[in-house]
Amino acid sequence: MTTNPLRALTDRRLQRIAGPCGIVLFGITGDLAKRKILPALYDLTNRGLLPPSFSIVGVARRDIDVRSAVEQSVREGAKTPVSDTALKQLLDGVSLIVGGYDDPEMYRALAQHLRGLDETRGTGGNFAFYLSIPPRLFPVVTEGLAGADLNRGENGSWRRVVIEKPFGRDLASARELDETVRAVFPESSVFRIDHYLGKETVQNIMALRFANELYEPIWNSAHVDHVQITMAEDIGIGSRAGYYDGIGATRDVIQNHLLQLLALTAMEEPVAFTADAVRAEKEKVLKATHLFGPAETNSVRAQYAGGWQGGERVKAYREEDGIPADSITDTYGAMALGVETRRWAGVPFYLRTGKRLGRRVSEIAIVFKRPPFLPFDDISGLGQNTLVIRVQPNEGTTFKFGSKVPGSEMRLRDVTMDFAYGHAFTEYTPEAYERLILDVLLGEPPLFPQWREVEESWRIIDQVENYWESAPETLETYHPGTWGPAGADAMLAANGHVWRRP
Ligand code: BG6
């Protein structure tokens, strides 16, 4: 059978329902479980996408009233309306195992509990182990699971492991982590979450590029001047000091989310929308990605100072609770990358992320070259054609192009053409976590980065982080509510470019 890529892109999986199974949630009392994972499990239940017997087993070091905790998370975080029936269905399947992550007895009790669920709730031996815990605990937990033979299904049942970032803090530590996980679970059972890939707008990059005839012919260095990929937040680090300090914006966001966006933007067309085909293209393009020039002039990092944001006085990063007064962790990171392929040679891809910036926005802007000749007198209002993929908020796509201003002169100005999800579709947009958790339960891996992609991403980031470590003086500061440090503007100015102010 020949593979029709357009047919392959028709993804109807959200109408599919997970078979009998359960999820074992390590870190059920953590922030991510409360804010994202548990509400997503409720939304899936409410939309009828989980089996009636679906079971959630929390693992915690201390005893808690787990059903009340789950209910509270659902009430605070669910995207769909909270119905008594769906909530009851979810809560009926919730249980807790108490014990230390390093205690073999806990894993034995867990194994026994899961066998019990197979009998009482018909989970069929199918379980996903979700590690929403600090990475230093991954080896302890995966070894504990293996010690109780929990990593292998029997009689055709499946076992999968879901891993949250940060997946290491550099290439060496990521490799070490990967080895400990893969000593216990085969790569095909490892689901690494990059929640950006669960976003509709991110999946739409592939549809936009490969389901249309318009863009592909100009999607290359002959027509594209440069690309800007931005993930900006207006919030500070909140209560995440323990996780964030020593990690920083570049490892937290560029290493995973932004490099995945770059890969989807720059990759060649996959032969089908299958995990292996998509990953092969992403891996290839990441392999070809390097700093655009020396780290000195192609990378910038900075930290937010104290000041005013949105009428509110906000602390400097170094004054936040739990942050050392001499911390040199970056809360802003930017870099210029080049993709060394025939398609992209010479085109800078600028990536930036930061906390306490002007506003919350994630977008990819493809900035096209100017026409080689412009036969008009007044072109002062004319910029460069730009295609902006708005990942969030106000999800959609905007195309900016030149147009004649009405009147007797030939005066030109930029105008925009807009596509907004909210106007074009009435369908429900699932939260990223909803989509990704369902894919784990269905065993569908196309939206999960494979180890080789993670490895290439760390190779790129290590080059920058190593340079920064050797040159502490490179840390700049920026004021809250602005668009980052002066060095980031200078980095683009060196190539005659300017950051967008989204
Ligand atoms: C997470 C980062 O991966 O993404 C956080 O660890 C960041 O620092 C978050 O706040 C942003 O996610 P979103 O979906 O709101 O853009």
Image (spheres, grey):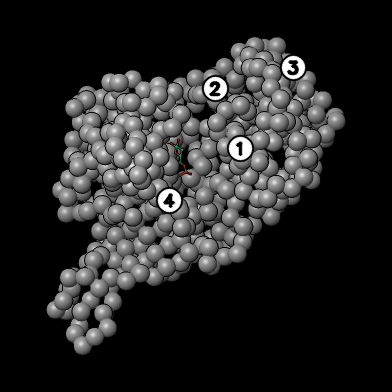
Q: Earlier in the sequence, mark 4 or mark 3?
A: 3
Front residue of 245/213: it is 245
Q: Answer left or right for 411 relative to 120.
A: left
Tell me what residue is drawn at x 53 percent, y 32 percent. 164
Give how far across and how far down residue 250 sits, in percent: 35, 35
Choose mark 4 or mark 3, whichever is in front: 3
- Ligand 1 neighbours mark 2 (CB distance < 8 Å): no
Tell me what residue is drawn at x 68 percent, y 50 percent. 81
Choose mark 4 or mark 1, whichever is in front: 1
Front residue of 402/70: it is 70
Tell me what residue is drawn at x 40 percent, y 24 percent. 321
Circle on res. 109: 3
Q: Write down the residue under mark 4.
A: 264
Q: Amino acid at mark 1?
A: Ile
Q: Write down the residue under mark 1.
A: 37
Tell me what residue is drawn at x 23 percent, y 76 percent. 412
Residue 369 visible in the current orientation: yes
Q: Are marks 1 and 2 in contact (CB under 8 Å)?
A: no
Question: Please, is residue 273 above or below residue 171 in the view?
Answer: below
**Measured Cα–Cα span from mark 2 to mark 3:** 19 Å
Q: Are marks 2 and 3 in contact (CB under 8 Å)?
A: no
Front residue of 441/346: it is 441
Q: Answer left or right for 130 relative to 260.
A: right
Q: Earlier in the sequence, mark 2 or mark 4?
A: 2
Front residue of 419/30: it is 30
Circle on res. 100: none
